Amino acid sequence: MRFLLRLAFRLLYNEFAFTYDLVSWAVSVGQWRQWQRQVIPFIVGERVLEVAHGTGDLQIDLAAAGYKPIALDLSANMGRIAKRKLARLKLSPPFVRGAVQALPFSAGQFTALVSTFPADFIAHPQTVSEFYRVLAHGGRVVFVPAATILPAHIFDRLAKWLFDVTGQSAFPRADGTGWPPKLIEAYRRPGFEIRIESVKLLRSVVWVVVAQKPNLDESKIGA
Ligand SMILES: C[S@@+](CC[C@H](N)C(=O)[O-])C[C@H]1O[C@@H](n2cnc3c(N)ncnc32)[C@H](O)[C@@H]1O
């Protein structure tokens, strides 16, 4: 089962990337875009990198909020789809194709790294160490790893089941506990201060992880 899921996700991010928007809309019963936006209020500073941009929707929201982010993803297909989508809106953020485990950026370059629904790489020690390196002191990693659908009506119940099966809402319990200790430990090891916020929406709860690199400077980056 685990192998099949991995294969399905690999295909979805690459050969079948053109179906991604429809799939994410369906499994979230139309809430995906709203879930993605929940990272924005936690951003500090102006130098923002989006990690694993997928089809590029969060770039639209970041631009609307006044940011000029850089976008990075490993998949060439995702890069092509995102570029086309943004060009239609007259947006052309710098796109970088690369792996989060080896970020092609200099130390302390960003004040915020954002990501929504990242893959397993988000808890990998090499990823976390790269995040720590490219962040300025006082900077943050902000990511939405999962959302929990509140089973309000029949479609939401079906989506909740699908979502649970694919592991997308697996780790938080309703009260926010039950996070994999591995994830928390991976961020604490290099020195991040980590907290998990829950944002309650009408039909779901969105989980936002905020990992802050300690601020060694007197001047704070932001709120
Ligand atoms: C579930 S999608 C999330 C896309 C988008 N952020 C969203 O909210 O819909 C995961 C993304 O991670 C990218 N990805 C997977 N492994 C990666 C890695 N090692 N480095 C960078 N991106 C990676 C995939 O290409 C895919 O676009």
Image (cartoon, helix red, strand yellow):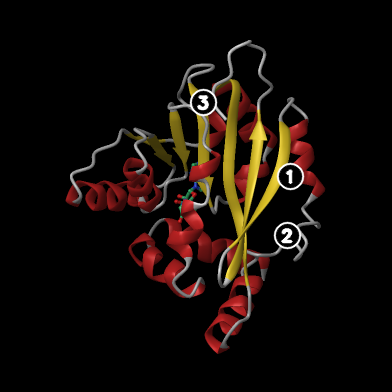
As drawn, 132 above or below 98: above
Disc 2 and disc 1: Cα gap in Å? 10 Å
According to the picture, the residue beneath numbered tag 1 turns out to be 183
Check disc 2 and give the amino acid type: Phe
In the rendered structure, which disc, 3 or 1, sits on the residue that comes first in sequence? 3
Do we see residue 9 in this rendering?
A: yes
Q: Position of residue 6 (x, y in %)?
A: 58, 61
In the rendered structure, which disc, 2 or 1, sits on the residue that comes first in sequence? 2
Question: Is disc 1 placed on a helix, strand or loop?
Answer: helix
Residue drawn at (48%, 75%) of the image:
29
According to the picture, the residue beneath numbered tag 3 turns out to be 111
Q: Quadrant of the C terminus?
A: top right
Nearest the camera: 156 or 94?
Answer: 156
As drawn, 135 above or below 18: above
Do we see residue 11 in this rendering?
A: no
Q: Residues within 10 Å of mark 2 (few under 14, many from 20)?
A: some
According to the picture, the residue beneath numbered tag 2 turns out to be 171
Q: Position of residue 79 (x, y in %)?
A: 33, 46
Image disc number at residue 142:
none
Q: Quadrant of the N terminus?
A: bottom right
- Mark 2 and mark 1 residues within 8 Å of each other at the beta carbon: yes
Which quadrant of the structure image shows residue 160? bottom right
Disc 2 and disc 3: Cα gap in Å? 27 Å
Residue drawn at (79%, 38%) of the image:
185
Question: Is disc 2 placed on a helix, strand or loop?
Answer: loop
Disc 3 and disc 1: Cα gap in Å? 21 Å
